[in-house]
Amino acid sequence: MNVLAWPIPLRTTSPSCWWTTLRRGRARTRSQKNESIFKGAFMNIIDELQWRGLINQSTDLDALREACEEPITLYCGFDPTGDSLHAGHLVPMIMLRRFQKAGHHPIALAGGATGQIGDPRDVGERTMLSQETINDNMVAIKKQLRQFIDFAGENAATMVNNADWTSKMTVIDFLRDVGKNFSLNTMLDRDTVKRRLESDGISYTEFSYMLLQSNDYVHLHDEFDCILQIGGGDQWGNIVSGVDLNRRVKGAKVHGLTVPLVTDAQGQKFGKSTGGGKLWLDPEKTSPYSWYQYFLNAGDSVVIDYLRWFTFLSQEEIAEYEQKVAEEPFRREAQRRLAQEMTNLVHGEEATKSVKLATQALFGKAELADLDEQTLVGALSETTVADIAAGEPRTIVDLLVACGLADSKGAARRTIKEGGAYVNNQRIESDEWEPAAEDLLHGAWLVLRRGKKNFAGAKLN
């Protein structure tokens, strides 16, 4: 059963003939492409990846570098275990884009089959998702992948769904053709499996995930002459298993490469529940304002790595920011550039402009009335928002207490008396002040501030 039909480039010849034709076409245009693509410091994509610190592990880097002298096909898989990808997925997604810009052909694999099982985690079994949920998640993830990889034009990427071939395999086929090539000892030696066995155990379902991912690599090598799989560092065991399965069943020399796992300044992994877990690509789950602020507040110890990994800034540009961090870290110029580039990348330049305006407006340096409601609400979501029901007291004293800017009514009155209470960037001088209809932003919102830096929101019903 096919979970979802994915658009795959139309071909009228056999897979091998199609790939041969495409490869010859690329070979004819390689010299022109290289003339425009490789005008920078790096003549080989692998050299650039090494400079950026994007190669965590690889199977045979010298052989891969040699293979990349010609256009290659590579892939990365994304399982639809959630309805949005997050910041931790960005490095491999951007990696596909880097290869594409260098003239190589990326394949984005959506895990319609593997997503029904889930890669084993260090702790606990995954909750099985319904088929309907997986279908919905795949639609959302497909849309997000199209933001970063070009699926049209001369060197179009390809989208595939591993349910299309996995669902056609019988249990006997799977055990004979795939399972027979795996040593149980090797599978048990995987770090995640070890940790699970030492705690609450692991089901055969999740234990078999490695076999499914390895079979994907064999299929993509047969279908598209794919010779490189990339993924996060936690995918190394699965990737190496796919490389080995290609060698065993096809005698094929293929490659594997992992990117570093992204961590914050405290060393927490960017994931769905840790580190950058709140950093979803979906603007409904993480507002552009929250996204921008997260990277604006990146630590000095990680900001240069983030610029190398997440952006397309040149070696010279990043070297300049590295010097600025070392000599004038208080200016936070690298962080501002990172936040701008990351927000442009995920949400677009218009969203970045709105976010910058909101940042200025919240602290009295621009007009709050110029913000659209979505940007205003996104900005206020970063702080306390008091929900004031109809009929509740709404004097400035009540509002300051309700949104947490004052511990008590007495403290609120002292703040007002000292000239430190603001509503919509206007100083409030009377403790009896109440908002009028014209004071409400977009008919419902107030921005309250105590002093220069402490702000909160109130929504009046």
Image (cartoon, rainbow, N blue to C red):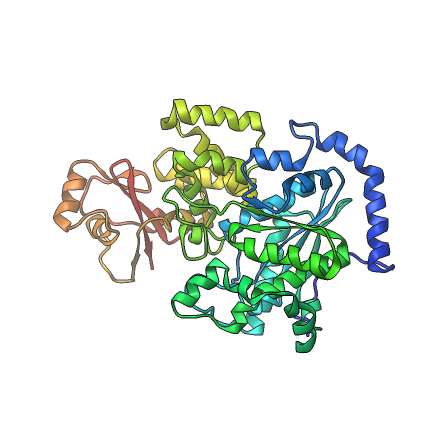
Tell which of 451 and 189 is nearer to you: 189
The residue drawn where x is 24% and y is 60% is 392
Tell which of 40 and 297 is nearer to you: 40
Q: Position of residue 44 (x, y in %)?
A: 68, 34
Q: Position of residue 153 (x, y in %)?
A: 76, 46
Question: In the rendered view, would you say 366 is above or below 194?
Answer: above
Spot the residue most to the left: 410
The residue drawn where x is 46% and y is 70% is 202
Tell which of 403 and 38 is nearer to you: 38
Q: Position of residue 323 (x, y in %)?
A: 45, 23
Total labels drawn: 0
Which quarter of the figure has residue 357? Answer: top left
Residue 366 makes an appearance in the image: no
Question: In the rendered view, would you say 114 is above or below 439?
Answer: below
In the rendered image, the quadrant that contains the C terminus is bottom left
Residue 426 makes an appearance in the image: yes
In the rendered image, the quadrant that contains the N terminus is bottom right
Q: Position of residue 95 (x, y in %)?
A: 61, 44
The residue drawn where x is 69% and y is 47% is 150
Question: In the rendered view, would you say 202 is above or below 108?
Answer: below
Q: Is residue 85 left or right of residue 11?
A: left
